[in-house]
Image (tube, grey):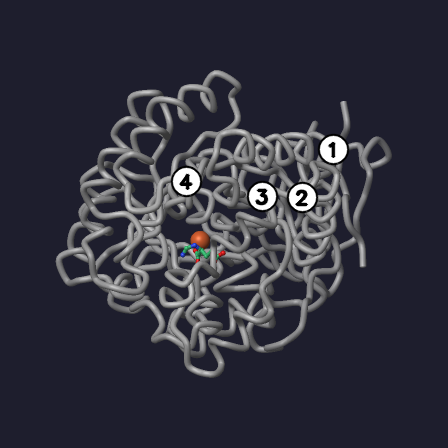
Amino acid sequence: MKKVLIKNLAQIATPTGKKMQKGSAMAQITCISDGAVYIEDGIIRKVGQTAEVCAGLDEASCQVIDGRDKCAVPGFVDSHTHFIFGGYRPKEFIRRLEGAGYLEIMQMGGGIQATVDATRSSSYENLYENGKKRLNHMLEQGITTVEGKSGYGLDFECERKQLQVMKELNEKQPVDIVPTYLGGHAVPLEYKEDADGYIDYMIEKVLPRVKAENLAEFCDIFCEDSVFSIAQSERLLNAAKKLGFISKIHADEIVTLGGAELAARLGAASADHLLMISNQGIKDLSNSDTVATLLPCTAFCLDKPYAPARRLIDSGCAVALASDFNPGSCFANSIPLMLALAVIHMKMSIEEAICALTLNGAAALKRADILGSIEVGKQADINIIEYPDYRFLVYHTDANLVEKVIKGGELVYEK
Ligand code: NIG
Ligand code: FE
């Protein structure tokens, strides 16, 4: 049995519980000073003050990690990314700076379609190598679980290529990858003017094969003006649900369409973006178990008003924070930037932001029972921060303070 002991930590800071925290409960972070964590075969067995945890323990049989002057927080869960893609879109970024809109560029054949072309012509090996580099960068920032979406293939073959790359990467490197089928990311040129026909194609030809090959757990759709309507999104997600996929929705990002209400109605794991969520949407999410996943770096990169994090939390919703890392709307996956935007601009407290990036991120991936907190029985995914207090994660605004990453009880990264 592999035994690991992290001891003498100046502080352990963690949300608690096996499910999402909603509303005011998000701010309840447990702090233990002079803390220790004892791990057996990747699972946390004891958490408490160093003297308590070490009592009766044969330290000589453990790998001991000294946490003096450091703080431990749960591994970060980035529950919304599009990190497998071919090519880049710098020209589009410049056009946006010159005033062009995100949907306007998409309608002119750029945007997501440009990445679809580049991903279709990328080899498996190229997608794999780039994916691996991006995962290394995530791990260095303390991301121990990441969700990855397809959606840059649209046809079955290329969607499968993206999902297979994620499957192999998941087996070969330490960051856990949770795969989502996002065939409903854009209407492909083959179905131009026939979005309903494309929905039929996904339902009849793609979803059953993705399921049969066990390539994805979640099904997501870009429910947006001039992309997929509420009715089309509902039709796809209902069909996916019948096959056993869990729903996610890119909801109310650019236009108020009712995506949040739909997510609540369908019992989706999460409704993501929500910059333009309606009051009814907030109400429906607060009465549901659907996590409101906010992506501040996207609002920042698109120069849009941030999602109403305060209103969501004050109304009793469970909020998660994620990167949305992708080559278009948000070519950024910086945890320090995300936390700074959430706290300084969206007015979340530091405690709420930590909960949003750990336990509630895990809930958005239906894994809050095993991930997202430093508690007995959970998987030992732990970040050791180079300062003695978790608040430095935002106070030291621009810096990556992750010094060590422990994933499933293994020390997988050290600065
Ligand atoms: O979440 N909004 C739709 N999808 C992505 C952007 C994808 C892209 O621009 O390539 C998002 O922002
Ligand atoms: Fe996205």
Mark 3, ligand 2, within 8 Å: the answer is: no
- The residue that appears at 52% across and 58% down in the rendered structure is 31
Distance in Å between CA atoms under marks 3 and 4: 34 Å
Helix, strand or loop at label 4? It is: helix
Based on the displayed image, in which of its 4 quarters is residue 140 positioned? bottom right
Q: Is residue 285 above or below residue 386?
A: above
In the picture of the structure, the residue carrying the numbered disc 4 is 190
Q: Is residue 363 left or right of residue 394?
A: left
- For the residues carrying marks 3 and 2, which lies nearer the camera in this image? 2
Which dot, 2 or 4, sits closer to the camera?
Answer: 4
Q: Position of residue 74 (x, y in %)?
A: 57, 50
Q: Mark 2 highlights which residue?
A: 122
Label located before the other in sequence (2 or 1): 2
User: Callout 4, which amino acid?
Assistant: Glu
Q: Position of residue 294 (x, y in %)?
A: 39, 59
Q: CA distance from mark 3 to mark 2?
A: 25 Å
Q: Is residue 371 above or below residue 324?
A: above
Looking at the picture, how far across and down is residue 275, in whole percent? Answer: 31, 66
Mark whose residue sits in front, 3 or 1 = 1
Q: Amino acid at mark 3?
A: Thr
Tag count: 4
The residue that label 1 is drawn on is 172
Report if residue 135 is visible in the image.
Answer: yes
Closer mark to the observer between disc 2 and disc 1 = 2
The location of residue 102, given as percent across then percent down, is 40, 67
Q: Mark 3 against mark 4, which lies toward the viewer?
A: 4
Residue located beneath label 3 in the image: 145
